[in-house]
Image (tube, helix red, strand yellow):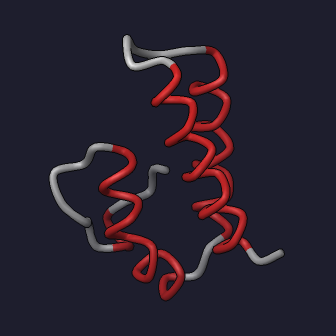
Amino acid sequence: MSAYDRYRALLNKLRLVRARHPEGDSPEEDGLLDDLDEVWMEMSEGERSAIATERARVLGLPKAQPADSAAQP
């Protein structure tokens, strides 16, 4: 499985965890955010660009950020 595919799978898991815990952070969410950060660093710039919109939506970012300026999950 590519880094891109792993990142998408982690985003989907995060979406589900947040739906189960709308009140805020959970240990599971914290772990997923750490995993997302690790996989993000493995992805190419093209992969980051391809997932930017979905990433912004799931993480609650104001808009999709350029891949080179977004070194976070």
- Is the residue 56 above or below the residue 53 in the image? above
* Horizontal side, residue 15 vs residue 38: left or right: left
- In the current view of this chain or complex, which residue is farthest to the bottom? 46
Q: Nearer the viewer, residue 49 or 68?
A: 49
Residue beneath the point at 49% across and 88% down: 46
- In the current view of this chain or complex, which residue is farthest to the left? 62
Check the picture and name the quadrant holding the N terminus. bottom right
Instruction: Residue 15: give x, y in percent of width and height.
Output: 50, 42
The answer to which image quadrant residue 59 occupies is top left
Q: Nearer the viewer, residue 22 or 3?
A: 22
Instruction: Residue 42: give x, y in percent of width and height.
Output: 68, 68
Instruction: Residue 3: give x, y in percent of width and height.
Output: 71, 71
Question: In the rendered picture of this protein, how many numbered marks are placed on residues?
Answer: 0
Instruction: Residue 53: give x, y in percent of width and height.
Output: 32, 69
- Is the residue 14 above or below the residue 46 in the image? above
Residue beneath the point at 62% across and 73% down: 43
Residue beneath the point at 47% across and 16% down: 25
Residue beneath the point at 58% across and 48% down: 37
* Horizontal side, residue 9 vs residue 59: left or right: right
- In the current view of this chain or complex, which residue is farthest to the right? 1
